[in-house]
Amino acid sequence: MIRRHVPALPLAILLFVSYPAAAQEAAHTNRACAADSTECPLDQRYHSQLEQAQKLGARLYRQDLAAWLTTDALLAAGAFNGPSPGKALGWLTQDRDDGTWVGYFAEIEGAPQVFAQATLVKDSRQVVGATRLDEPRPATSRELHQLAARDTALAQNPLRCTDAPFNTVVLDDANDFVPGIQVFLLSAMTNDALPMGGYHQFRLSEDGSKVIDHYAQTRSCINESRRGLPNASALAITHLTSPTPTAFHVFMSLQYERPIYVGTTENGAMWKVEGTRISEVKEE
């Protein structure tokens, strides 16, 4: 898993074909203000979409951050030293009261088992409990379905925009806005490339065996060079496929630590996505 800290981004207008990940199952808008109304501000007309994009984007980022930081903590603790307990099967994350738990799986005696784990403490970057288990534990039924869903999504061979393996996020509870299991495949940064394309959202059946929906964020790869990034302060994106910014924009703003200006062609609006906040940029 290749991880990254990007101090800044170049200011560029990119053709960015993205998907309203949080809003795909939330076509309804604020009941007090119809989406086609010209009398209401855009942030009221699209209140539901914006709220869900903010929440889902923040959650995607937190899950991805947990995988990154717990990997570093486990490496530092020597949890991955010595012989592998079996074929590596990657990781899964789970939100708990104390933070985001990350379990690392291997195929042991023919079945997936957790052999290492750690927790990213809630609302922090602190990792606790980084350890290699003395006795690996068998995967639960839920974890088996999540692993199956992730493998089913990866088997579709979707567009990947760097040579690094996808970073993955698997979500499957009531906070995810849609039924079934959702798998997000995120093209990973490398030392040379900052991918702006190659992001995917899959919705799969409850057992993870069948793809119900698949959205590819872009139709082709859009990679930005990491050279010269420190001097830039924001990223500007033309967005074609929804009237508002999406969870992917929120995720990127959090990941790159810079605001993203999103121009939506459907309504000619300009939005500012800064961290978890989406706001309309209004003309003076």
Image (spheres, grey):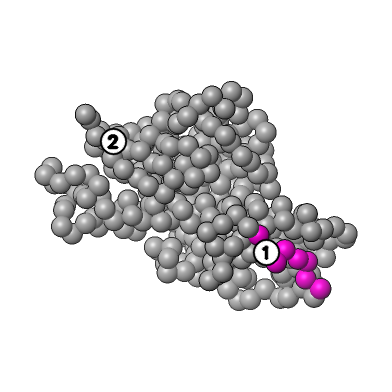
Coordinates of residue 234 in the picture (x, y in percent): 45, 31
In terms of depth relative to the viewer, which is nearer, 264 or 131? 131
Q: Residue at 67% of width from left, 73% of height from top?
A: 139
Q: Main secondary structure of the magenta part?
A: strand
- The relative height of residue 118 versus residue 51 in the rendered view (above or below) is below
Residue type of the residue flagged with mark 1: Val
Rendered position, 18 above or below 140: above
- Locate residue 192, reporting x and y percent: 65, 30
Screen quadrant of the C terminus:
top left
Q: Count neighbours of disc 1 (C-alpha within 10 A) and say few if under 14, some if 14 to 19, many if 20 or more.
A: some
List the residue tagged with mark 1: 128
- The furthest residue to the right: 82
Pair 1/2: label in front:
1
Q: Position of residue 137 (x, y in %)?
A: 73, 75
The magenta stretch spans which residues? 127-134
Residue at x-position 71% and y-position 52%: 72
Give the spatial CA distance, label 1 vs label 2. Answer: 40 Å
Q: Is 92 contained in the magenta span? A: no
When the figure is inspected, residue 230 is found, relative to residue 171, above or below; the finding is: above
Q: Is residue 240 visible?
A: no
Task: Identify which residue is drawn at 39% across, 63% down.
Answer: 177
- Name the foreground residue: 195 vs 257: 257
User: Which residue has dot 2 on it?
Assistant: 281
Q: Identify residue type, mark 2.
A: Val
What secondary structure is found at the residue carrying circle 1?
Answer: strand
Which residue is painted at 56% across and 69% down in the image?
A: 98
Q: Mark 1 or mark 2: which comes first in sequence? A: 1
Q: Secondary structure at mark 2?
A: loop
